[in-house]
Image (cartoon, rainbow, N blue to C red):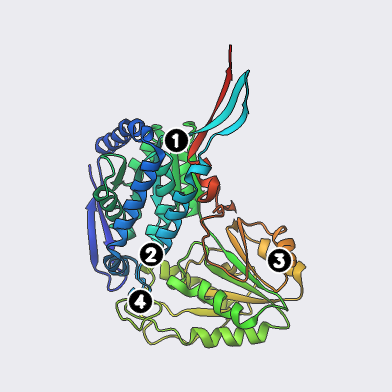
Amino acid sequence: MSKLLECISPIDGSVYATRETLSLDAARAVAKAARQAQTEWAARPLVERIELVRAGVAKVGETTDRMAEELAHQMGRPVRYGGEFGGFQERAEYMARIAEKALAPIEVEVSNQFVRKIKREPQGVVFVVAPWNYPYMTAINTVAPALIAGNTVILKHATQTLLVGERMVEAFTEAGAPADVFQNVFLDHDTTSTLIGEGLFDFVNFTGSVGGGKAMERAAAGTFTAVSTELGGKDPGYVMEDADLDAAVDTLIDGAMFNAGQCCCGIERIYVHESLFNAFVEKAVALVNTYKLGNPFDPEVTIGPMANVRFAKEVREQIAEAVADGAKAHIDTFAEDDGAAYLTPQILTNVNHDMRVMRDESFGPVVGIMSVKNDQEAIALMNDSQFGLTASLWTKDASRAEAIGARIETGTVFMNRCDYLDPALCWTGCKDTGRGAGLSVLGFHALTRPKSYHLKKS
């Protein structure tokens, strides 16, 4: 029996879009169709698959105004930021450019006696479960290389961004994608788990909560289906005594507050050398007080509502608990703060790691700032987390940053920047952030399997 999915707009709490979920039998039919289409799709020349993906991306680019408007309705991002097409295109185009080299056979020997080489074969049917916070960019991370590598793709989007999967598949279909090569589905959790448990997918890519990642792994247990996960984060920034203070404040605070703090690799805790601490906090507070909270369709608004009232409730609770335990909140409540989805961005000091706001993922516009005496203390604090996605180091000394980076338990080390996904580098994490290898050459390797050829000539 189908269920009704409802996207509740954070702008005013109204129902923005609804879709019915597929029945289990209908969902199985989608997976079967993808399986049947995959062989023919993989047989197409690589250059054709690359060009079709580029054409699909270009079609998405023809609707950027609609993208920005629909994202504002669905998850609250201000229209002034123009949607996600820039990063969407950058990631897809990079993967298209490196595809031929990344997927080329590894030749071990070509002689009069032997041909020995390793080829890359597509996994088969790839299931992408994408999140709502950057719904186009997170999806294309896997969709583009999966299709280029010869897989068929089934995309399931979060209910909060209910329309995004439809829009992507619509664009790729208009660009000429064959039937059943790229499909969008609406599924409930039980049907999703059943499909995975029945081994109907060859690769599962999930971006979301730790609990969701565990559910995916439980569903796949015993099927030997590869499950790639990018889960929670509590990404730190460390400002050293030789840092460019103004650049550190501007970048780290933007990394903490942009998209109402709802970024996978957003900055959630900052450690500042004691010599710069007071100045950093003063500048950070001044910057946040320039933000304008409000309706995302107002071109003057720089920070919109959080995507859902329950997300804002969790952030408010973390802030309230921290203040009750002695933290100092530096930002007075904005007039537009409605106690629901519209939330005042907040900077906290006098915080410590006994507070949830410094341990649990906040995924909202709040950041705790602590003073540290040296690198050793900063490293210990950065590693004192169950998560490991990115870390941002601020110094003029690249050698020092690399040495510190080697001691941090994280997937990516930034120096003098943050909150950016470089498609040439592997997007990965450790600890409860999950395991996976997205984008870069390694992204193609994850979406394919090796096949060895040992050919002895007679």
Q: Spatial distance from mark 1 to mark 3, Cα to Cα?
A: 38 Å
Sequence-earlier tag: 3 or 2: 2
Could one spot residue 234 in this view of the protein? yes
Residue 411 position within the rendered picture, expressed as x and y whole percent measured from the top left: 60, 55
Q: Are marks 1 and 3 in contact (CB under 8 Å)?
A: no
Sequence-earlier tag: 4 or 3: 4
Under mark 3, the amino acid is: Ala
SS class, disc 2: loop
Query: Which disc is residue 38 wearing?
Result: none
Q: Spatial distance from mark 4 to mark 3, Cα to Cα?
A: 34 Å
Q: Is residue 85 left or right of residue 248?
A: left
Which residue in the structure is indicated by mark 4? Answer: 80
Under mark 2, the amino acid is: Glu
Under mark 4, the amino acid is: Arg
SS class, disc 1: strand
Crowd tier of the residue under label 2, counting other residues whose Cα lies within 10 Å: few below 14, some 14–19, many 20 or above? some
Crowd tier of the residue under label 3, counting other residues whose Cα lies within 10 Å: few below 14, some 14–19, many 20 or above? some
Under mark 1, the amino acid is: Pro
Residue 382: quadrant of the picture:
bottom right
Which residue in the structure is indicated by mark 3? Answer: 401
Could one spot residue 127 in this view of the protein? no
